[in-house]
Image (spheres, grey):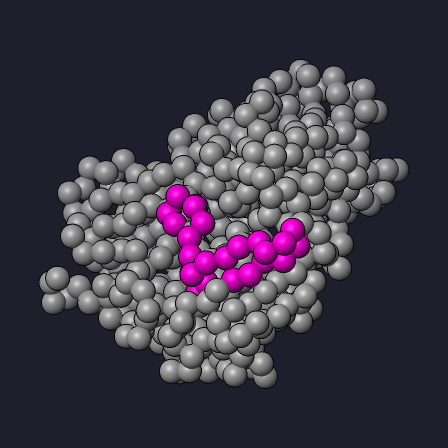
Amino acid sequence: MPSHAADLRIGLAADVSSLDPHFVNIAPNIALSSHLFEALTSVDANGKLQPGLAVSWKAIDPTTWEFKLRRGVKFHDGSELTADDVLFSLDRPATLTNSPGPFTSYTKPIVAKEAVDRYTVRLKTATPYGPLPLDLNSIFIVSKKAVQNASADDFNSGKAIVGTGPFKFGGFKRGEAIELVKNPQYWGEKPAWDKVTFRILTSDAPRLAALLAGDVDAIENIPTADIARLKANPKFTLAQRASWRTLFWHLDQVRDITPDVTDKAGKPLAKNPLKDVRVRQALSKAINREALTERTLEGLATPAANIVSPGILGHAEKLKPEAYDPEGAKKLLAAAGYPDGFRLTLHGPNNRYINDEQVVQTVAQLLTRVGIDAKVETLPLSAYFGKARAGEYSVALLGWGSLAGDFALRSLVGTVNPDTGWGSWNWGKYSNAKVDQLVAASLAATEPAQREKLAEEAATVGLKDYAVIPLYHQYASWAVKKGIRYTPRIDEFTFAWQFRPE
């Protein structure tokens, strides 16, 4: 390895909103936490389940799972990982009641926990629950001693960031940079880098400029307009693959009067048109997904009919992307009582997904063509998610990646229930008893083929009801300085330890 290769600098496209690994369930936070903490299970670059802090697991009866912990694993402070840390970590998400995006959908199925011995944990579910090992990939194991009385300031200072991951916390400048240092006691394959600096470069131009200037060694989310230029530049290599992320619209389907929809004079409508399935279908038909993916996204996406990508359990192949049909959209609007359309505002982030602001603008233009006067309001991710989750919007853009369709449906369109964790990202408050029933049956299935069939059926019922309006499946891309390679991941995560010198 060249002498200079011990430091790695990566330009990130999205900011990290919290250093607490259980506070907000969004990809930038999870990606960072994955360097510092680990879960009982993990997934490889293709999304396949792998051992993590648990070396094995099995269902010892239909509602009881037993996990055997990896022995000799040390936290960053030198203390040993034990079953008590695991139980504490699984309890913790439910204690963070002010989270804008909780992890509780992964922990709520667990109704009882037991440390059988120092290295064995048993988890009980109320009903048979096959995907529990995959769920637990999302819950990071923290040191009980370091975290049980920790505040947000303790995480921001690094005091409470005591995990078992391949890197230790080095420093944090909010909105600017995060530094990590190699954990020499790490039990797994050692990272190639002594120090890693993540620079927060949410705007495309500065992120690309930093790469071209040599200020960073790699960037994620290559600006679409610059892909061809980078491919032709011998100083860099590109890593690309279809990812797990699907972009879709949430629509307010619960309130009788929704805040962002009025008549064309700006007066409130007597009722919320988004509650009418004909209107939701009209919005979907008005969107030209081919144009959106080929032009606005410059080929870095494919039109979607599902909320999970092809190849992921629960992706219903029989569902096809809604055909662009503006005349059909107008007829549906007329049939629903809106022959002259109405006015609405589309909300979305402007620094989270590929060309997200342009995507919102493109869809607004398409809706206008069918008689819906669509305004656009986009915000930085840090402000957007909180407002969307608080129900401030009528139509809001969200991108979601999941390793299983029933997981995604549970979080995104499952009937909201704080007690079970269902619907934790169901911004539109969609509710359909049949969908809930099918998702529950899928999650209870312990036979993979049965689970897949039920997950596909649940997706079909929900999406034919326009629970959300899918737009496209996004591609993931990285640009890396020559001499370094990166294996692209389906989950889009940028993991520093998976960059290796060539």
Foreground: 480 or 262?
A: 480
Foreground: 402 or 83?
A: 83
Looking at the rendering, which quadrant does residue 174 occupy? bottom left
Foreground: 75 or 265?
A: 75
Percent position of residue 297, x then y: 44, 35
Position of 232 relative to 329 (above/below): below
Describe residue 174's horizontal placement relative to residue 448 as left or right: left
Foreground: 401 or 223?
A: 401
* Residue lying at 68% horizontally and 66% vertically, measured from the top left: 112
Percent position of residue 215, x then y: 24, 61
Position of 485 relative to 80 (above/below): above
Q: Residue furthest right?
A: 270
Percent position of residue 268, x then y: 83, 41
* Residue 298 shows in this picture: yes
* Magenta region, residue range: 44-67
* Residue lying at 58% horizontally and 19% vertically, measured from the top left: 323
Position of 214 relative to 241 (above/below): below
Describe residue 436's horizontal placement relative to residue 24 as left or right: right
